[in-house]
Amino acid sequence: MATAAPIKPVFKPFVPATESRPELTVRALLLGAIFGVLFGAVTVYVGLRAGLTVAASIPISVLSISILRAFGRASILENNIVQTTGNAGQSIASGVIFTLPALVFLGFDLEASRIFALALFGGWLGVLFMIPLRRQLIVEEHGTLVYPEGTACADVLMAGERGGSFASRVFFGLGIGGLYTLFQNDGLFALWPGSPHYEPDLGAQHLLKGGSIRADCTPEYLGVGYIIGARVAAIMVAGGVFSWLVVMPAIHFFGSGLTHPLYPATTLIKDMSPSDLWKAYVRPMGAGAVAAAGLITLLRTLPTIVSALTQGFKKGSSKLTAALPLRTEHDLPPAVVFGGSAILIVLMFLFLQFKPVPGAYVGPLANLAAALLIVVFGFLFVTVSARIVGIVGSSASPVSGMTIATLMATAAIFLVKGWTAPAFGALAITIGGVVCIAASNAGDTSQDLKTGYLIGATPWKQQLALMIGVIVCIFSIGITLNAMNRAYEQFQRMPHPIALSLAQLPDGVQNKGYFNRDTIPLTSHDADNPAKEQLTGATQYVLLNAIGSTTLEDGKYLYNPATSQIEVQWIQGIGSERAAAPQGRLMATVINGILSRKLPWTLVLLGVALVIVVELLGVRSLTFAVGAYLSIATTLAIFVGGVMRWMVDRAMIQHAERAHLAANPDIIDPDTGLPIPTSVTPALDTESEISPGSLYASGLIAAGGIVGLLGVCAQLAQSVSEERGGHWKLFSFNPDNPLHHDWVSVIMFALLAFSLYYFARKPLNQPKP
């Protein structure tokens, strides 16, 4: 006799479908737009520096509950619109920083119009393509796809509706982290060093010379380390230790006796600082490691991708036009989806046709094909991303691997067509960038729609809020990218000027015309101990761009026609040690490797081999590879946050065990007299995304990003003032002040870490049952 199929329980949202509450209000959209601009900029700042991003929906929800409550009773649906609109900034920024910085590495400028257009196209594609998938992924598979960030965000919103107060913990993080950054940041008061460092040179054999131990003691790194956890932070710092205390000292040991530069460097190894060694040798090796790890991650998730595609196309196209009587089932109509997609194809075609990458005009037919290619890859990876984040969460979604696949397919087409000039690499980044942004935004859009489903939101209002959030946030994203690139740039005097002829430039070197700035701040070659001066009359120099050259390291240079020599190297802010942008470097490496085939392949393949070894050890290699690429200053500070998380988790486990033993005094091992180990409640033995520590860490990240951006603006304003002959400078303490010592920086960072440990263990004001 056949067994009857179990009856699926009827899901009931927090706000019933029959109940109507304020939702898509003007104040909710305005507050969400402000958060979108703010967290979009913060994500760019933290992502370029740390190489990873964290979800913004929970801190936005917490802040929204507190702010709207101050203006009168707020609906839970209004707070949901705020976090939905604001979270678009974080998701778009994540996609942008993974790809578009590659334009800098390929020798092109970050044009504001290009960033704006690509972010808009990708962001709207991610929302539009997610609309027909919502019913299948969010509703039909409610019990299968958990969407962890979306579910946690719904918990925060429902707790706030019941009267729980989480905002104070975020505000504490904002206040303490902001005050700390104000005095720590090199672009602001700089009361103590922002990055204490130690360069070992031990004994007569100069042990570990060439390596360095340093830490960017910022609150955002501390918060990121706490949120990602001890294990991930430890794997990341292990990559940094390998690069900075194994590989770089080994390079110096074996290469210090060389009498000629070792490719790809153009300086003798014995004259190179740790930063020079990292830039010349570790970055290519790290890029190869990240590329290999990204592909391995993509292959590992291939079964999930295939399942996502097959299950995504199985059901539901007939349901798109069905009558949907309930408020909680109203999506934007199919006409918006298909009509909007068609309009985006036209807009992308027009953009490629009338705003082509300089030197990469390919004609109307090819531009139409590129626009269609973007839509095809976009829909493919939006479907994949929306399903994968439902299983593993947004942070573990292999967006970079999917982008690599898009870039490799695009670059292969270009190679067959013979389009191998650097400009076509920028065109490939344009295509891959839109796809990456769409996939990134689709993942977070699905999390937001899951939150809305749980609390009883109206889907079409959320979808409209997401599209508004995309439009608003892209302004701050482009501005922040360019501001960081400009504020962190350096003009370094070449240690040995290089003579060459403009009439016969070496292979891979291009003449970009005369330099367009008259006054620039010039530093000595040693980036670790720079001596600064002002260089006037810089407009006499010719700007040269090197990509894949065996004569010059990749980058930009100022050539003096009067002496027929390259005298100055222009180091871009993006790609420097302070804003390493590892994913962008990875994308440029993939494109350059396929099109020009002039990479330092020995170093790239060393990185690939390193990843294989790490995988054979049973460690997920992508985190290790990112750590090997980044400066140890970044990974060491993140590791401190991970240690704080481990200490808090350990204290919570011990507390739960003591409480369990007090309630059950008979559970004693008669042989040893010790308590018998027991399993404790998961809510007690580990941190969650809405725990006191995670909320305080979110405040630290926001504070470090916001105040850090103020430092970027101050540095940028000072640079512009000096170029115009002025002497404006924000007040900062003299480097000779008694607190400007590395040990003071370490102590202050330790105190900040202790504040995280303290507030992580201090209970929250729990909501009413």
Image: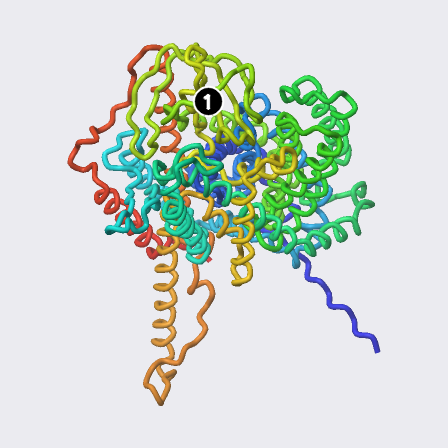
Q: Position of residue 649 (x, y in %)?
A: 39, 61
**Is residue 729 placed above or below 458 in the rendered structure?**
above
Q: Is residue 697 visible?
A: no
Q: Position of residue 601 (x, y in %)?
A: 56, 42
**Is residue 145 placed above or below 85 in the rendered structure?**
below
Which residue corresponds to mark 1? 557
Going by the image, does 154 lie left or right of 731? right
Quadrant of image for the N terminus: bottom right
As rendered, which of 571 and 216 lies closer to the eye? 571
Q: Position of residue 681 (x, y in %)?
A: 46, 68
As rendered, which of 435 and 464 lies closer to the eye? 435
**Is residue 669 placed above or below 726 in the rendered structure?**
below
Going by the image, does 158 lie left or right of 699? right
Q: Residue at x 52, y 63 (%)?
A: 617
Type of colouring: rainbow
Q: Is residue 663 visible?
A: yes
As rendered, which of 537 and 701 lies closer to the eye? 537
Q: Position of residue 210 (x, y in %)?
A: 34, 44
Q: Residue at x 59, y 34 (%)?
A: 24
Going by the image, does 628 lie left or right of 106? left
The kind of residue on which mark 1 rests is: Tyr
| Mark 1 Cα shell of 10 Å, populated few (<14), some (14-19), many (≥20) | many
Going by the image, does 576 lie left or right of 352? left
Q: Residue at x 52, y 49 (%)?
A: 606
